[in-house]
Image (cartoon, rainbow, N blue to C red):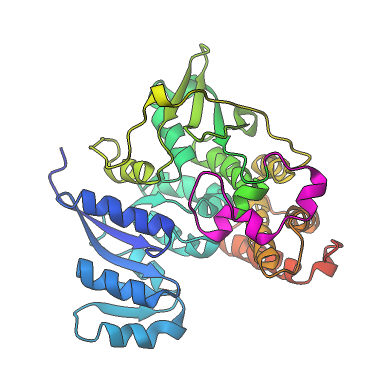
Amino acid sequence: MLQKKKRIVLLGSTGSIGLNSLAVIDSLQDSYELIAVSAHCKWQVLAEQARKYRLNRVVITDPLYLDPLQKALADTSTEVMGGPEYLVELATDERCDILIVSIVGAAGLPAVVAAVKAGKTVAIANKESLVVAGCLLMPMAQEYNATILPIDSEHSAILQSMHSGRREEVEKVIITCSGGPFRKWTSEQLAGATVAQALQHPTWNMGPKITIDSATLMNKALEIIEARWLFGLDPEQIEVLIHPESIIHSLVEFCDGSVIAQLSNPDMKLPIQYALTYPHRLPCTTRRLKLSELGKLTFEPPDRNRFPALRLGFEVARQGGTAGAVLNAANEAAVAAFQAGKIGFRQIAELTEHCLRSHKWIKNPSLDQLLAADRWAREMVASPEKTGAKVS
């Protein structure tokens, strides 16, 4: 089925998605070859990966770690580069067939844009690229004959379920979420939530930023916006349901009332592999789902009063333009402030909403204008007195 060995570039190889991607590539080694990777600061891990896979090139985006990485790989043929600007160079490598982007936040956006313009297949784990620039990326992908595939489990589930009918037959999609560690907490309890508590996700093992986004449900807000652009949906066609078991990852309802769902055990290897082998399927090393052991599957509507991030997600999906860039950047900065103990848990959404309300919205922005909106939002969160939000 897959004759030619496909060559992969992986951006963000030392995080949870990156490590899972490497495990998938290892299991598919006869069909896929890793040629280059990047990491932000874990230079020791990057050096080990370069040796194991005999990589052509590696990029460490924090130049402070360039020197030790170069010394660690001095006896190899691996080309070592330092600085975020080299991500674009990796993304547009003419030898690359598939680019996996698992960099947290908007930092991977320039590389995604460059890869799309180069006509690559781009497997995106960082939903921020589509949140910030979906209005540019999807038309661009069509213009340059590029393919954008989701790696996150929810959008992979939507993609898989949509194959049960024609696009025009889709009535709505339902994105599920575990509800995070604070699903049953009151508003009063949420006000005192600590970083350690926010990082105790009940289902998934993820990086700290994504885990905190899951606790605020901002991850679902971002996924609403991503689904809007990735599948060309109206915001009214998107619904969110809390599903604590995390077995059904998303559902698609068709015009005849049929609902198609994708089910699997919580394991990122499956959506990663589906993106690499798309539109085909190959055996996967993930643990198989045994329905007889599940007992029951439960669903409940999310509380938008306790978790206002969801409301913001729908608002931004309707607005488009620069709103996605502001939402994403403000949230990233606010999450960092929460981790540093500068603000409380509920103020993450509060600061983000203040930025949305006070920014100068542009309907059809350029990439430069999107990046400028990103910078503006980060500056506003860094100086919260400008937003009128109270800080602890």
Q: Is residue 353 left or right of residue 314?
A: right
Viewer-proximal residue, 25 or 11? Answer: 25
Q: Is residue 151 above or below residue 177?
A: below
State the residue at coordinates (67%, 29%).
301
Q: Is residue 155 above or below residue 100?
A: above
Picture quadrant of residue 114: bottom left
* Residue 283 image position (x, y, % from top left): 23, 37
Q: Is residue 329 left or right of residue 246?
A: right
Viewer-proximal residue, 67 or 190? Answer: 190
Picture quadrant of residue 311: top right
Bounds of the magenta span?
Answer: 183-211
Q: Is residue 153 above or below residue 190?
A: above
How many numbered marks appear? 0
* Residue 302 image position (x, y, % from top left): 69, 34
Q: Is residue 292 left or right of residue 53?
A: right
Viewer-proximal residue, 190 or 372? Answer: 190
Q: Is residue 201 left or right of residue 347?
A: left
Q: Report if residue 197 lies within the magenta region.
A: yes
**Residue 167 visible to the viewer:** yes
Q: Quadrant of the N terminus?
A: top left
**Residue 101 visible to the viewer:** no
Q: Quadrant of the C terminus?
A: bottom right
* Residue 371 image position (x, y, % from top left): 60, 64
* Residue 59 image position (x, y, % from top left): 36, 74
Q: Report if residue 208 lies within the magenta region.
A: yes
Picture quadrant of residue 71: bottom left
Q: Is residue 75 above or below residue 213?
A: below
State the residue at coordinates (71%, 70%).
379
State the residue at coordinates (61%, 52%).
213
Viewer-proximal residue, 168 or 273? Answer: 273
